Image (spheres, rainbow, N blue to C red):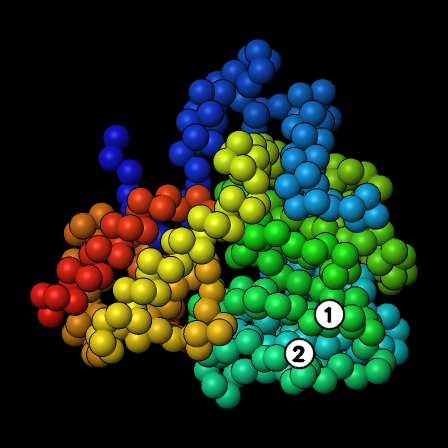
Amino acid sequence: MKRALNFNAGPAALPESALAKAEKEMMNYQGSGMAVMELSHRSKEFEEINERTKNLLRNLLTIPDEYEILFLQGGASLQFSMVPMNLLEEGSIASYVLTGTWSEKALKEAQKVGNAVIAASSKNANYRFIPSSSEIDIPAESSYLHITTNNTIYGTQWHSIPENLPVSLVADMSSDILSRPLNLSAYGLIYAGAQKNLGPSGVTVVIIHKDLLNRSRPGLPSMLDYRVHADSQSLYNTPPTLSIYFLMLVLQWAEELGGVKQLEQLNKQKAALLYDAVDSSGGFYTGHAEEKSRSLMNVTFTLNNEDLTSAFLHEAEESGFIGLAGHRSVGGCRASIYNAVPLENVEKLSDFMNVFRSKN
């Protein structure tokens, strides 16, 4: 079967080996006579999946024991509310660095919960860059600083995070988790929707320092309280069992590939191919992000006019490339090259860009 050259921003490409294994096990998981989505979440089989998935993630990202790993629902968008509900202490402030649409939405939800302010922003430059640490102003009364480590719409990424902060650092890593090694000790909490680098949509990973679990406001609804999910091993209610199973398969694939350092190397190779096609085009393609802030996950670029853009996208689709249209906030084109996008597919896109330029 011919597979699409998938550059969708999310839900995004999954490793073919993970899909093949899921297909093989679809009707009969581990001799149970049932598909994974038919298993009870209280069954021995699913409890093993849940535990195996946590252990794989802990090993791949070198997550210290003092951090809890939670598998939740509601996407990163629910975390926009859960973070301030659990971490924004009475009388304190939540500080947010605005680097794109998703950080704007996170701030908006936090302001419904309590006092949330902008600590830095690149909005006036149409989010072409990541603010430097020296530009971040954190009020003394802050409970935490929130950043979005990769900005899918604008194609920017934090390549060095603020360090030695007087407050906990909270990060939305939905679109670049597992793409490079992390120093987990620099973060108080990380959250990530799975549908870009970790698996299919439906499960959200939260990694939280155990000390922060005690900050939750009294009287929170149980489903919105991190402590409830930590105490129940993410099994307080019926979890998204199929999504967690696929997360396990993707993590197994990453482990077999060589881990996060190998993924980082491949991601750098893929990004270099496309940025070279942009930079060597003599202005035919123009990158949206400033060079020092360029994302390794989402390569955004424009062409000289709408007619050329339409022709590019039309010819690309006819050649098998999917998901290359840019977001309306930026226009132009966007190639999302998450972990599971094969290097050979990116090579084909780079060749296509060069050929299209030479013809036009």
What's the mark number on residue 133? 2
Residue 114 visible, this angle? no
Spot occupied by residue 143 in the image (x, y as percentages of width and height): 82, 72
Side of 63 where 346 appears, left or right: left
User: Which x, y percent locates residue 84?
Assistant: 76, 67
> CA–CA distance between discs 2 and 1?
8 Å
Residue 236 % position (x, y): 77, 39
Check if mark 2's residue and mark 1's residue have beta carbons within 8 Å: yes
Residue 120: which numbered mark, if any?
A: none
How many numbered badges does the structure rendering display? 2
The amino acid pointed to by label 2 is: Ser
Disc 2 is placed on an element classified as: helix
Label 1: which secondary element: loop
User: What amino acid does circle 1 point to?
Assistant: Glu
Which disc, if any, is residue 163?
1
Specify the farthest residue to the bottom. Answer: 124
State which tag comes first along the sequence, 2 or 1.
2
Measuring 81% from the left and 38% from the top, which residue is drawn there?
232
Is 51 drawn above or below residue 214 in the view shown?
Answer: above
Which residue is at 67% across, 83% downward? 134
Q: Position of residue 269 (x, y in %)?
A: 40, 53
Q: Residue furthest left?
A: 359
Q: Which quarter of the figure has residue 171?
A: bottom right
